[in-house]
């Protein structure tokens, strides 16, 4: 690998040949690069579903986006399971999904600002 020699100040110095240094550098580069290569046996699942989540709503659209407003003093309950027959509003379809799969999905509930009481 290399030779060890003593300097005048009694420090040990390891001297490498050019071939040994090239081997060491190649090994270091490969070892470092392997840390950035994704593993096919990853322990963390990055996809929640194998296919589409939305199988029924506005399928011809590249993206389903809904704008809505909430009136003062009222609330709206929005679907997050994509199974509602009244999408984008929730109809409780998530309850059957949760019972079947053990999931815990629920709706998004949005409340408008409370009405201010008028003083007489």
Image: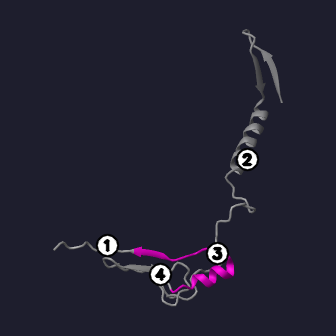
Q: Secondary structure at mark 2?
A: helix
Sooner in the amino-acid sequence: mark 4 or mark 2: 2
Q: Which residue is mark 1?
A: 114
**3D distance between C-alphas at marks 3 and 4:** 23 Å
The circle drawn on residue 25 is none
| Residue numbers of the magenta segment | 91-110
**3D distance between C-alphas at marks 4 and 1:** 30 Å
Q: Percent position (x, y) of residue 49?
A: 65, 75
Q: In the displayed structure, does residue 70 sit left or right of residue 58?
A: left
Front label number (3 vs 1): 1
Sooner in the amino-acid sequence: mark 3 or mark 1: 3
**Residue at 72% of width from left, 9% of height from top?**
9
Sooner in the amino-acid sequence: mark 3 or mark 4: 4
Q: Is residue 87 magenta?
A: no
Q: Which residue is mark 4?
A: 64
**3D distance between C-alphas at marks 3 and 1:** 33 Å
Which residue lies most toward the bottom here? 85
Q: Would residue 108 be visible to someone looking at this image?
A: yes
Viewer-proximal residue among 18 and 108: 108
User: Mark 4 packing: few (<14 Cα in 10 Å), some, or many (20+)?
Assistant: few
**Residue at 78% of width from left, 34% of height from top?**
19
Q: Percent position (x, y) of residue 80?
A: 52, 78
The circle drawn on residue 103 is 3
Q: Secondary structure at mark 4?
A: loop
Q: In the displayed structure, does residue 57 sit left or right of residue 120?
A: right
Q: Quadrant of residue 29?
A: top right
Q: Are marks 4 and 1 in contact (CB under 8 Å)?
A: no
Q: Secondary structure at mark 1?
A: loop
């Amino acid at each position: 690998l290399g030779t060890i020699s003593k300097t005048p100040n009694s420090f040990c110095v390891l001297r490498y040949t050019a071939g040994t240094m090239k081997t060491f550098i190649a090994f270091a580069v490969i070892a470092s690069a392997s840390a950035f290569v994704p593993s096919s046996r990853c322990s963390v699942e990055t996809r929640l579903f194998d296919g589409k989540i939305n199988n029924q709503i506005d399928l011809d659209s590249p993206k389903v986006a809904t704008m809505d407003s909430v009136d003062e003093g009222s609330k709206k309950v929005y679907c997050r399971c994509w199974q509602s027959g009244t999408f984008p509003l929730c109809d409780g379809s998530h309850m059957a999904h949760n019972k079947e799969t053990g999931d815990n999905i629920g709706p998004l509930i949005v409340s408008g600002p409370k009405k201010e009481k008028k003083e007489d």
